[in-house]
Amino acid sequence: MQQKKAVIIGSGVAGMASAIRLAVQGYAVTVYEKNDYPGGKLSAFKTGGYHFDAGPSLFTQPQNIEELFTLANEPIEDYLLYHKIDIACKYFFENGKEINAYSNKDLFANEVQDKTGEPKENINEYLDRSEKLYNNVANIFLNYSLHKKSTWLHTRAIRAFSSVKFPYIFKSLNQYNTSFKTKETQQIFNRFATYNGSNPYKAPAMLSLIPHLEQTEGAYYPQGGMINITNALYKLALKKGVNFHFNAPVEKIICPDNIAVGVVVNYENIIADVIVSNSDVYFTYKHLLSNSIKAKKILRQERSSSALAFYWGINKNFPQLELHNILFSEDYAAEFEHIFKSKKLYSDPTVYINITSKIEKAQAPDGCENWFVMINVPATNTYNVEEVKAAARKNIIEKLNRILKTDIAQHIVTETFLHPQSIEANTGSYLGSLYGTSSNSKAAAFLRHPNFTKRIKNLYCCGGSVHPGGGIPLCLKSAKIVSDLVKHDIKNGRKIHA
Ligand SMILES: Cc1cc2nc3c(=O)[nH]c(=O)nc-3n(C[C@H](O)[C@H](O)[C@H](O)COP(=O)(O)OP(=O)(O)OC[C@H]3O[C@@H](n4cnc5c(N)ncnc54)[C@H](O)[C@@H]3O)c2cc1C
């Protein structure tokens, strides 16, 4: 029998994970990538002796990557080494308080009690609920398509729903977190809404399951930086026989009679049995399927936040900083009002600083540090980049000087800037959103585009803009769901919903 062919559009983490899974299923897989490198948002660059991971910096749930290597029967340690970090994040407040969020639950609870007066029992009880919610709900939401009857006609669905209590849906994350007595603790736990680009004052308290991942399961660091996740997946895909074409933008998905049969790349028709789009689902409809009506419908769901980031080479060591650092805004509600409502730059932004040279000194010259400095901003394509850059730079520098008691500008020796328009240009993420769509509504999880297209047979979707959402762990889950759907559809045939 002739080997079946699969084409993947895009080599983001989800595209590469889908490629590996379909290759393991026996498909001849070809990936077409418009850039000249793999990884999409998960890329890196070097300048002036400094290494910078360009996008994601927080690595959680390595088991999603381990699963790919187990499936492919390859030893992960030959491809990727990583370890759990002791301090998941260090928090700084305008009132001078500093809190280490230890990856160990008890240490973290004690630290918050010591620094803020929040009883440690409150933290422990919250994290216990977070863990329980995650264990009951995550399986169904993260491992299955929510758009298939079979998902719901199963005992696991009943178990998941019986554990979803009223407040998880009808309270916002912020309302839920007012159970904490101290403002600092509320702010720390509100922040987890930003892990999928959402607003804690709107997103449902269901997102209270996220802290379990960082504070209980723990945060990890991949040796060589986040780019080595991309390198490991790329190498594994090659090992499994996947073909990659770079500088190869897919222009069109060929689908006569609502059956996807191939793609057009560089004016050439490439025929395949299965097509998986890792491109933003809005662009998949708008450009690859020329379906502007459906593309417009997708925009009814609010995009996640985007980011402005400065990659700064710093000619000094800052011993008070860790790998991950957050310098909180004084008024968190006002900050999110700016990001999601007035869509303006906020003058006192929460600043995130990631410094991988804290763990691997070689990532910066001797006595120096590589700072990735990021603030959350609206997803947009209307910024006047130079104006926004100047304003954000000023706001960030003032905040750093205030909290770190320094004059940071004199220590910046290299600077590269990232903004929503460059994120869209580099990765094809509409409006530069980091995580596809936000979770700012109760129904967000159900409104995200499924991992298949209801009206087009043989076309599947993976990545941050579709179910179950953005962030590396969820993108990897989307690849698993796609691969399971393909297997199921090949075995059982698939109806298309005309
Ligand atoms: C600044 C920043 C910080 C982040 N921080 C974190 C973090 O700390 N932790 C975390 O887990 N996540 C983080 N994220 C989110 C995370 O990076 C993404 O959710 C994830 O990497 C998206 O992967 P993806 O598979 O959806 O593909 P993407 O990375 O979006 O890549 C899609 C690929 O498809 C290609 N493509 C698109 N259209 C076409 C076409 N027509 N033809 C050919 N190729 C095409 C693009 O060029 C791109 O390479 C961050 C993102 C950014 C930008």
Image: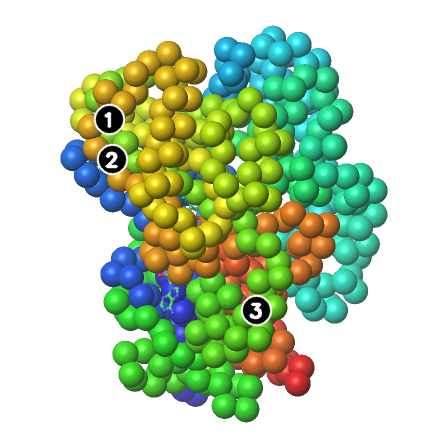
Horizontally, residue 345 falls left or right of residue 168, namely left
Residue 290 rendering spot, x and y as whole percentages: 47, 79
Q: Say which residue appears at 36% left-offset and 28% top-offset.
A: 394
Mark 2 lies on residue: 415
Work out whether residue 106 can be spotted: no
Q: CA distance from mark 2 to mark 1?
A: 7 Å
Outermost residue, left direction? 48
Report which quarter residue 57 is drawn in: top left
* Ligand 1 picture quarter: bottom left
**Residue 319 in the image: above or below residue 218:** above
Tell me which amino acid carries mark 3. Lys
Mark 1 lies on residue: 412
Ranked by sequence position, the earlier of labels 1 and 3 is: 3
Tell me which amino acid carries mark 1. Ile
Q: CA distance from mark 1 to mark 3?
A: 42 Å
**Residue 291 in the image: above or below residue 101:** below
Q: In this rendered view, identify the residue nearer to me: 383 or 180.
A: 383
**Residue 100 in the image: above or below residue 416:** above
Report which quarter residue 424 is drawn in: bottom left
- Image mark count: 3
Tell me which amino acid carries mark 2. Glu
Residue 207 rendering spot, x and y as whole percentages: 66, 41
Mark 3 lies on residue: 296
Disc 3 crowd, CA 10 A, few/some/many (<14, 14-19, 20+): few
Quadrant of the snapshot with the N terminus: bottom left
Q: Say which residue appears at 44% left-offset and 30% top-offset.
A: 352
Q: Say which residue appears at 67% left-offset and 43% top-offset.
A: 203
